[in-house]
Amino acid sequence: MEKLLNDSAFDNIRENLKVIRDKISEAAVKSGRGENDVSLMAVTKTIDVPRINYAIEECGVNLIGENRVQEFESKAGELSLSGCKAHLIGHLQSNKAKKIVGRVDVIQSVDTVSIAREIAKHALARGITQKVLIEVNIGCEWSKFGFDISETGEKTAEIAEIDGIKVEGLMCVAPICENNSELLKIFENMHKLFIDIDSKKSDNIDMKILSMGMSGDYETAILGGSNLVRVGSAIFGPRIYSDKH
Ligand SMILES: *Cc1c(COP(=O)(O)O)cnc(C)c1O
């Protein structure tokens, strides 16, 4: 591997992952589940290929998330993705759908019926079924994307009818709450919704993934029922945005 960074940058990634995995296991057990019942996604937006490949090849990361189609495309060819899945977790514009369908295992950010139709159209054209999650807007100040919690059940059923995609769960970005018990309540409500949709036993909905929790709140999210946490800066350190973004 090309060593573009000093060794301590890599050591930090390894150390951070160890700490985070311990905390995930602890929270999973505390929530009544097994140590391995919660998946860790490394969120790799703005992170360069050598650091991502280090996390995958040397630290056992087997799931990464990217926000932007263009950024994923520019890195994908150099990433060691043979034993590692990739998800799209950022808002998808319809003119970019063609470029991402079939390139990632799951598109987590389906936030309108029309983007679901657009994804499905390209999936059918490629002869595949694209797995997706439904994004729920739980009142985050900085994310305007996602369905209101009250309409999510109905919209999920509508999206699940579309050929070419398969609904595998829900995702949300939590608001920044000073109050941990308020935040826990929000995650628990998401979990209730997840269970509720699952209990309807719809043929074309397979509620496997409840994607919630980021660097600042993944332990609370797990206590609230999350089974996939999306962690970026706690693994790789603070993001440095170039002015292109
Ligand atoms: C950036 C991002 C994350 C990770 O954020 P951190 O706070 O760095 O862990 C998770 N989910 C989404 C949708 C993101 O955009």
Image (cartoon, rainbow, N blue to C red):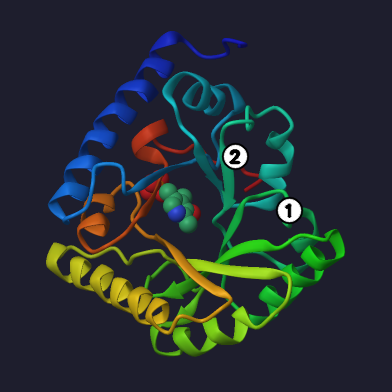
Residue at left offset 65%, top offset 29%: 79
Dot 1 amino acid type = Gly
Which x, y percent locates residue 102?
A: 73, 53
> Can residue 138 be spotted in the picture?
no
| Circle nearer the N terminus (2, 1) | 1
Comparing marks 2 and 1, which lies closer to the viewer?
A: 1
Q: What crowding class fits label 2: few (fewer than 14 Cα within 10 Å), some (14-19), or many (20 or more)?
A: few
- Position of residue 57 in the picture relative to residue 8 (left or right): right
Q: Is residue 23 or residue 244 the one in the foreground?
A: 23
Which x, y percent locates residue 204?
A: 58, 76
**CA separation, marks 2 and 1?**
28 Å
Q: Is residue 79 or residue 154 the one in the foreground?
A: 154
Q: Which residue is mark 1?
A: 102
Residue at left offset 30%, top offset 22%: 15
Tag 2, which secondary structure?
A: loop
Q: How many marks?
A: 2
- Residue 69 drawn above or below residue 159: above
Dot 2 amino acid type = Ser
Q: Is residue 151 or residue 85 the one in the foreground?
A: 85
Which x, y percent locates residue 117?
A: 72, 77
- Residue 219 drawn above or below residue 10: below
Residue at left offset 16%, top offset 55%: 32
> Can residue 149 be spotted in the picture?
yes
Q: Report whether the residue tagged 1 is closer than 8 Å to ligand 1.
A: no
- Residue 57 drawn above or below residue 122: above
